[in-house]
Image (cartoon, coloured by chain):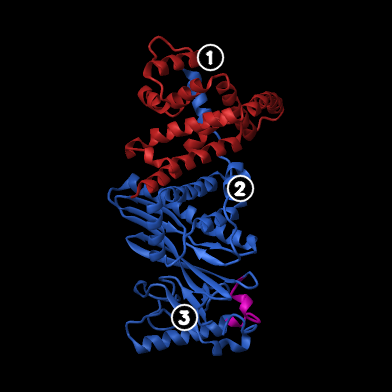
Chain colours: A blue, B red
Amino acid sequence: MKKIEELKKQYNSIEIPKGYDEMVWLSIEQGKKETNLEDKVESREYKMKSRVKKGLIASAAAVATLTIGFTGAVNLSPAFANTMADLPVLGGLVRVVSFNQFEFNKDTYNADLEAPIIDGLSDTELQKSLNSKYLEENKQLYDQFKKDVADMEAVTEGGHLGVDSGYEVKTDNEEILSIGRWVVNTVGSSSTVMQYDTIDKVNQVLITLPSLFKDDSYIDIVSENIVNQMKAQMEADENNIYWIKGMEGAMGDEGFEKITKDQQFYINQAGKLVISFDKYQVAPGYMGVVEFEIPTEAIQDILVGNGYIK
Amino acid sequence: MEKKDLLANYLYENREKHYRMAYSYAKDENDAMDIVQESIYKAFKHLNSLKKIDSLPSWFCTLLVNTAKDHIKRNSKVIALDSQVLEVQLEKEKENQERDPQDILEEKVTNLELKKELDKLSFNEKTVIVLRYFEDMDLKEVAAATDLNLSTVKSTLYRALEKLRIKLSSQEEI
């Protein structure tokens, strides 16, 4: 029987090819939809639910476009490619479709991960890279979570772990699509991280913070404006607390001084620049994620133009 | 949690195991991926046929084995050609290994040796070996997963061991 042991060892060391995880993930998502399509009643309920929940459109065709975005998976499997070919082609409407990705519920361990899927960009490379980024992020969150649960189960009983991710569409108009993604980690207390992507729908480019301005002077100008807003808010209501560098209440050398070059931001429905900080970053936890709308007058002189910011 | 979410979690968590099972039948990586993928689709499509959630692992195992079987049937010509290619490749890799014994190369050869051994077996023989010894199922579970009765599983297993030239010592049982 020694030989069987030897063969088993070889069996267990069979290499898992690159791209396999993605393929499994996407097939599961596709499979879930198939189940829905089979059962008409359930399908309708499901769509209703997701529309009510997120106020977004979920359609089989849209999900299909997502999958086409991942050429890796398509190339790897002819069967997959054929399934996709049967589906209708969509018009050039840029939008975000809901895409419920993963749930894990066991005793006190809960994960609920959801990523946005952008659909309808004619620049498929841009779309693909954004969608893969979102998918990859959530995949890593899920794997990390599984690992954390295993670690915790090994040492204690009855711990609590949670991870939630999701997204919100901040702006969706003729010109701009701004999406924010959040991740909440719960271990005792919770931390929240926000990330944004803003797309120019017309020119099909990703807008970065530096690209809005003529030069780097925006860092100081925007920061100064934020500090003033922080101070004004604290004066107006003593429950508002921000940590500002050099001010009373700030811990030692800590506290907000300047935004980073690539600070998280989005452009809101009114065309204003909004700067976002994660929980704990510039304020105590109870303030949550904080945002500052920068008045356009304050930055008008250094803006490249008023195409995006109005 | 809904049934389909349970299935989704199960499939993702056991993805590597399913890959190895599929790979035992497949001619190469892509083939193995196709088998897993097709099995996943079928699982969601026929989820109604899963009556008890406890039997999810053996239910999916049966589905995967049957999918592999169909897959082989469809590609039988290609496989015949491919095992020859495999032989040649194995020889080549062995030669290379003598000259340059790298770990990576070794692992590749190991895979090929396993494949070469498994290729000696018929479909059912391969299945019982994989499920019984590699996936550590007991004979009853193997019978359930393969739709064979218990005595057929036993006789198939004995035959497979014989083909692999594995001898059981007097106190060992299958």
Q: Chain of mark 3?
A: A
Seen from this angle, which residue lies furthest front? A40
Label 1 to label 3, Cα distance in Å? 73 Å
Q: Is B56 within the magenta?
A: no
- Disc 3 marks a residue whose amino acid type is Phe
Give the residue displayed 41% in from the left and 42% down from the top.
B10
User: Which mark is in front, 3 or 2?
Assistant: 2
Image-quadrant location for residue A278: bottom left
- Please tell me which residue lies in front, B153 or A256: B153
- Please tell me which residue lies in front, A92 or B85: A92
Label 1 crowd (10 A; few <14 / some 14-19 / many >=20): some
Residue A292 — which label?
Answer: 3
Looking at the picture, how far across and down is residue B73, in whole percent?
Answer: 57, 28
Looking at the picture, how far across and down is residue A178, in whole percent?
Answer: 53, 72
Q: Which residue is mark 1?
A: B163
User: Which mark is in front, 1 or 2?
Assistant: 2
Residue A74 — which label?
Answer: 2
Q: Is residue B31 above or below residue B154?
A: below
